[in-house]
Amino acid sequence: MSTDSTGEHDGPVTEEITVTVNGETVTAEVEPRLKLSDFLRNECGLHGVRVGCEHGVCGACTVQQDGRSVKSCLSYAVQADGMAIETVEGLDEDGSLHPIQEAFHETHALQCGFCTSGFVMATKELLEENPNPTREEIETGLADNICRCTGYQNIYEAVERAADRMEEE
């Protein structure tokens, strides 16, 4: 922690964290109150992490932390110290879209696109846990994400298409 021994300090109290973000090690001094979403967007330049409701309701800020979906607007960057974070930007494979991203594109599972990265990351966890989900399991698996544009049908179709494609690989 960066404070001096007299108890007085210049500027805010910070803590050093080291996280692995999309496979890259990042070390930074952050204020303990800095949200993980703000750290990823502002310190790491990952603007696919969207901040919508800031209450964990919409799911636009969904990222994977050590392989589990988390709402990054509800987490602090200091809580991610020592962990691996994956964002939608980390899904490409040698410059090619991930099968989930391809499926969302092909089925037009987005309109404004604001929620898409959160849905893609939630889909990734869903398909890792259940590679062949039923429509009901897809709806349940994505229930923590909100889209105000699409009506969800194309999103569910994208998940089914991605599941088929990933099963073939």
Image: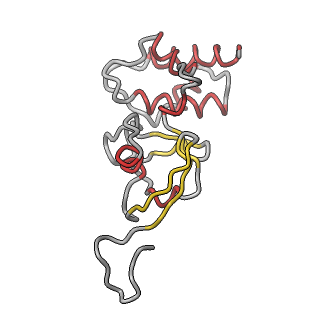
Indicate the colouring scheme.
secondary structure
The residue at 49%/37% (across/down) is 87
The residue at 36%/72% (across/down) is 13
The image shows residue 67 at horizontal and vertical percentages of 61, 42
The residue at 43%/30% (across/down) is 117
**Residue toward you, 71 or 24:** 24
In which quadrant of the rendered image does the C terminus lie?
top right
Question: Relative to 120, does residue 5 appear above or below in the rendering?
Answer: below
In which quadrant of the rendered image does the N terminus lie?
bottom left
**Residue toward you, 44 or 51:** 44
**What number of labels is visible?**
0
Q: Quadrant of residue 92?
A: top right
Q: Is residue 69 left or right of residue 110?
A: right
Q: Is residue 152 left or right of residue 140?
A: left
The image shows residue 100 at horizontal and vertical percentages of 55, 21
Farthest residue in the top direction? 106
Q: Is residue 61 left or right of residue 17?
A: left
Question: Relative to 50, does residue 149 appear above or below in the rendering?
Answer: above
**Residue toward you, 132 or 125:** 125
**Residue toward you, 22 or 73:** 22
The residue at 45%/45% (across/down) is 71
Farthest residue in the right direction? 168
Farthest residue in the left direction? 11
The image shows residue 108 at horizontal and vertical percentages of 41, 12
The image shows residue 84 at horizontal and vertical percentages of 58, 47
Question: Relative to 141, does residue 81 appear above or below in the rendering?
Answer: below
